[in-house]
Amino acid sequence: MEISLFEPRIPQNTGSIARTCAAFDITLNLIEPLGYKLEDKYLKRAGLDYWPLVKLNNYPNYRIFKESKKEKRIIAFSKKNGIYLKNFRFLEEDILLFGREDSGLPENIINGCDSLISIFMPNLELSNNDKKGVRSLNLSVACGIAIYEAYKQINYQNAN
């Protein structure tokens, strides 16, 4: 399994995701342009001293990333219109693709992926005019939930 971030904007999110990837021994792919420099102090601080354990790949754009992964399933994540996470069956070679914090994944990227997954959130069902609902999960939290579910399915067949 691999985690891929499409044009991430917030270094602290990427640092936290990198730390989770290190803990689960999962490759992290960053697809440029990034909203920060890889030397950013907030990125490094969020990843703590785990950076040497992170298997990190950097891609200059989505086209090059996609071409390098053509033999694998790319699974897009969006807050709406996807198969609920618990109902999807992950494979060991899957690539989990997450979008920008501010705008998510563009429609053309989603349409080119093998599947679209959503993480169930009861407050997403509220009307757009209702300011009481939570619009989405933090990117690092969403990645953590997805990593856990996929890892559980792949490594512990009877844990479902």
Image (cartoon, rainbow, N blue to C red):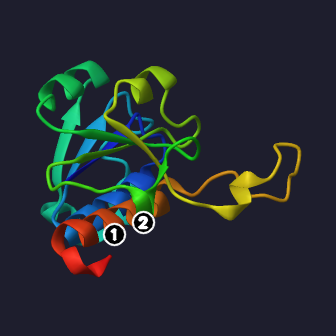
User: Label 1: which residue?
Assistant: 148
Q: Residues within 10 Å of mark 1 (few under 14, many from 20)?
A: some
12 left or right of 66 in image: right
Quick check: can you spot residue 152? yes
Residue drawn at (17%, 41%) of the image: 57
Quarter-of-image position of residue 36: top left
Residue 119 point in image, percent of width and height: 51, 57
Give the total number of marks visible in the rendering: 2
Q: Nearer the viewer, residue 112 or 32?
A: 112
Q: Which mark is residue 145?
A: 2
Quadrant occupied by the N terminus: bottom left
89 left or right of 9 in image: left
Residue 156 point in image, percent of width and height: 20, 76
Residue drawn at (17%, 72%) of the image: 155
Quadrant occupied by the C terminus: bottom left
Residues under numbered marks 2 and 1 in contact, where contact means CB atoms less than 8 Å apart: yes
Q: Nearer the viewer, residue 80 or 23?
A: 80
Residue 111 point in image, percent of width and height: 42, 25
Q: Is mark 1 on a helix, strand or loop?
A: helix
Q: Which amino acid does label 1 sit on?
A: Tyr
Specify the farthest residue to the bottom: 159
Residue 52 point in image, percent of width and height: 14, 62
Quick check: can you spot residue 61? no
